[in-house]
């Protein structure tokens, strides 16, 4: 059952009024060359907050703390059911040092973040979060 299911967590990290976006490398199988928030897959039995903190540190070298989920979304990709959760996270320390999964990063405004070339689920999730219905 679990081979066709993925739980993905992403971190909306804010520092000095800007949000961190990182660009996927060309060799990644899912959405190469697109921008995303740091984070990744939760391993079976792993604590959710610790998993996200681990993934962010692996991808960026930053230390963060999580403040709970902001956004959830689900989609199908290549026969795999993916549940994505985006958390609001506090920047604690460190300078961005990217893993080889990513080629670039930038700290951007909310508008700039929404204008980036993001995966469909992330673009939809962030748009819905930043521009809620009245």
Image (tube, helix red, strand yellow):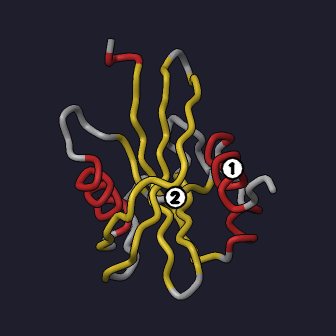
Q: Please tell me which residue is depicted at 67% across the width and 77% down the height of the picture.
A: 109
Q: Which mark is residue 123?
A: 1
112 to the left or right of 10: right
What's the CA distance linking mark 2 and mark 1?
A: 11 Å
67 to the left or right of 81: left
Residue linked to disc 2: 37
Discs 2, 1 touching: Cβ within 8 Å: no
- Residue at the top extreme? 1
- Residue at the right extreme? 134
Q: Position of residue 61 (x, y in %)?
A: 31, 70
Q: Position of residue 125 (x, y in %)?
A: 64, 48
44 to the left or right of 37: left
Who is closer to the viewer here, 121 or 36?
A: 121
Who is closer to the viewer here, 131 or 21?
A: 131
53 to the left or right of 108: left
Residue 15 vertical placement versus 13 (above, below) = below
Q: Position of residue 60 (x, y in %)?
A: 37, 67
- Residue at the front extreme? 134
Label 2 element class? loop
Q: Which mark is residue 77?
A: none
Circle 1 packing at 10 Å, graded few (<14), some (14-19), many (20+), is some
Q: Please tell me which residue is depicted at 48% across the width and 20% down the height of the picture.
A: 80
Q: Which of disc 1 and disc 2 is earlier in sequence? A: 2
Q: Quadrant of the N terminus?
A: top left
Q: Quadrant of the C terminus?
A: bottom right
């Amino acid at each position: 059952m679990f081979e066709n299911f993925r739980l993905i967590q992403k971190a909306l990290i804010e520092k000095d009024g800007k949000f961190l976006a990182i660009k996927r490398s060309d060799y990644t199988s899912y959405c190469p060359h697109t921008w995303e928030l740091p984070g990744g897959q939760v391993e079976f039995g792993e604590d959710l907050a610790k998993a996200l903190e681990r993934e962010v540190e692996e991808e960026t070298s930053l230390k963060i703390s999580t403040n709970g989920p902001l956004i959830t979304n689900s989609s199908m990709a290549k026969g795999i059911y993916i549940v994505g959760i985006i958390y609001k996270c506090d920047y604690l320390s460190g300078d961005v040092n990217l893993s080889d999964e990513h080629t670039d990063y930038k700290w951007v405004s909310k508008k700039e973040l929404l204008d980036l070339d993001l995966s469909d689920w992330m673009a939809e999730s962030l748009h819905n979060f930043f521009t809620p219905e009245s």
